[in-house]
Image (cartoon, rainbow, N blue to C red):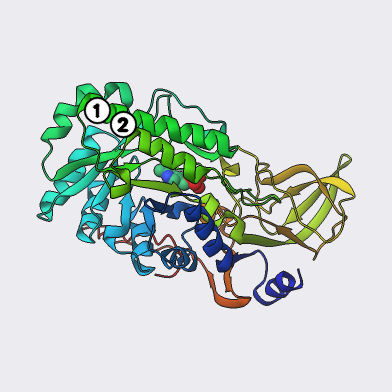
């Protein structure tokens, strides 16, 4: 605690602190919970801080790769030591320009969500005189696990509807510049427990094998998604998955007997589980006020700093870690001029006053870059990366307006840097 106090005093609040040893430990533990023949894509959107990405790049064994969805994330991945060939490019809105940039920098694996998407990848690859591997992202007709975020079985901008694949396949097979390499499933995030996670994986593995057989689809690569959980802005431990490895191996043996020899290659994805527990947010109390009998603790960090999904109407389960016991319920709010800037409504808090610090644990995923960073124009929080108890870097994202000529051709759009420094 003293140490966080010290960092807050040196660099001001709000400040994020990322423990790179915990990032490495999370990666080691998760890779250990998965069969050794498999690989793991880190979804940069969870936290594109360059030191965090580089820590995952450095995980021994080289099984950790990068999942990116923009030119900015690609720039970050490359700057952190990943090669284009290490990247999986995903997302429902890939533009032809982004695809050209990605192919130009060596990305050869794309998850695709529609025929047009595949055509755009093919066009970008042909422009560069090459061929790209595409995975068909499949929106299955149903799912099984219990989760807070489900993205399958309903109408969606993500993926091909499984039942519509037969009709679109002939057209997909005619697209030049691409090789149909396999499938990508990402049905859920933040699974409730190991059993529901495994149930979803079993369903995915079985479904993928069946689709490949029935549709005579090539299956050299199968990304079976993720759902690995992490506590979010609340106390808690990173879950462990002691039974996953054997259960996965058994399910893969049953459906895809060549997998141990890399036919198909098997990949997983994770964002929050790898980085969530590595981050802590320290914020300062600016003011405390009472309104109609309710107490409001006003922080210098709101949804402009710890946005998560709260800016979209979902309240974070924020709670605050303290040395002192909570004594009362109060609302923890940010400095923004909107009643939506609430980090926690009527949550247990100790008596707080201006100048006090509050610490939000497990804030390493979906923090700074998932926040309404520009809203009301406050500076971005400082971000401090720590390894072995030593500070590795201190940085702050800057926002500034750059001007373009009013007339004449528009200049090339700059890549929005996802991670801070290039
Ligand atoms: C967001 C996302 C992830 C990461 O999700 P987590 O819940 O943070 O693990 C992985 N894959 C895809 C396709 C995603 O969109």
In the visual, does 409 lie left or right of 366?
left
Residue 299 vertical placement versus 255 (above, below) = below
The quarter of the displayed image where residue 75 is located: bottom left
Q: Residue at x 67, y 71 (%)?
A: 12
Residue 289, numbered circle: none
Between residues 178 and 14, which one lies in front from this camera angle?
178
| Residue 365 x, y percent position in the rendering | 55, 53
Q: Secondary structure at mark 2?
A: helix
Q: Which residue is mark 2?
A: 209
Screen quadrant of the C terminus: bottom left
Which quadrant holds residue 254? top left
Depth check: 224 or 175 in front? 224
Report the residue marked by disc 1. 213
Badge 1 crowding class, 10 Å Cα cut-off, few under 14, some 14 to 19, many 20 or more, is few
Residue drawn at (31%, 50%) of the image: 89
Q: Is mark 1 within 8 Å of ligand 1?
A: no
Q: Which x, y percent locates residue 237?
A: 66, 52
Q: Position of residue 123 (x, y in %)?
A: 14, 46
Q: Residue at x 59, y 77 (%)?
A: 391
Q: Is residue 372 above or below residue 279?
A: above
Residue 315 in sight in this render: yes
Q: Residue at x 69, y 50 (%)?
A: 236
Q: Residues within 10 Å of mark 2 (few under 14, many from 20)?
A: some
Circle count: 2
- Determine whether, in the image, residue 161 is placed left or right of residue 366: left
The answer to whether mark 2 and mark 1 are in CB contact below 8 A is: yes
Helix, strand or loop under label 1: helix
Query: Residues under labels 2 and 1: Cα distance?
Result: 6 Å
């Amino acid at each position: 605690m003293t140490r966080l106090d010290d960092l807050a005093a040196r660099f001001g609040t709000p400040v994020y602190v990322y423990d790179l040893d915990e990032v490495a430990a999370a990666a080691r533990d998760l890779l250990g919970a998965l069969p050794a023949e498999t690989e793991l894509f880190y979804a940069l959107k969870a936290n594109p801080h360059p030191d965090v990405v580089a820590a995952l790049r450095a995980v021994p064994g080289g099984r950790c790769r990068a999942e990116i969805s923009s030119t900015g994330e690609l720039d970050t991945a490359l700057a952190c030591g990943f090669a284009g060939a290490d990247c999986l490019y995903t997302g429902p809105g890939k533009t032809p320009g982004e695809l050209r940039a990605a192919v130009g920098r060596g990305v050869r694996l794309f998850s695709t969500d529609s025929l047009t998407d595949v055509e755009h990848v093919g066009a970008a690859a042909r422009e560069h005189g090459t061929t790209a591997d595409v995975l068909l992202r499949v929106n299955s007709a149903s799912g099984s696990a219990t989760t807070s975020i489900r993205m399958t079985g309903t109408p969606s901008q993500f993926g091909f509807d499984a039942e519509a694949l037969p009709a679109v396949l002939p057209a997909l097979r005619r697209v030049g510049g691409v090789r149909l390499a396999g499938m990508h499933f990402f049905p859920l995030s933040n699974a409730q427990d190991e059993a529901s996670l495994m149930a979803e994986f079993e369903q995915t593995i079985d479904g993928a094998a069946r689709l490949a057989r029935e549709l005579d689809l090539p299956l050299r690569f199968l990304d079976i998604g993720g759902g690995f959980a992490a506590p979010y802005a609340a106390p808690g431990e990173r879950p462990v998955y002691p039974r996953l490895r054997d259960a996965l191996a058994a399910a893969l043996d049953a459906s895809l007997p060549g997998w141990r020899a890399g036919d198909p290659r098997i990949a997983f994805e994770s964002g929050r589980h790898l980085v969530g527990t590595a981050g802590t947010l320290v914020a300062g109390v600016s003011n405390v006020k009472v309104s109609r009998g309710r107490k409001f603790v006003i922080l210098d960090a709101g949804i402009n700093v710890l946005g998560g999904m709260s800016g979209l109407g979902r309240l974070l389960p924020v709670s605050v870690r303290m040395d002192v016991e909570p004594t009362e319920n109060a609302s923890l709010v940010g400095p923004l001029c909107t009643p939506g800037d609430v980090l926690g409504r009527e949550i247990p808090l100790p008596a707080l006053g201006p100048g006090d610090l509050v610490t939000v644990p497990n804030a390493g995923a979906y923090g700074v870059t998932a926040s309404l960073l520009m809203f009301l124009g406050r500076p971005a929080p400082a971000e401090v990366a720590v390894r072995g108890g030593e500070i590795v870097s201190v940085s702050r994202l800057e926002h500034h307006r750059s001007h373009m000529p009013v007339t004449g051709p528009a200049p090339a759009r700059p890549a929005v840097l996802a991670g801070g420094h290039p």
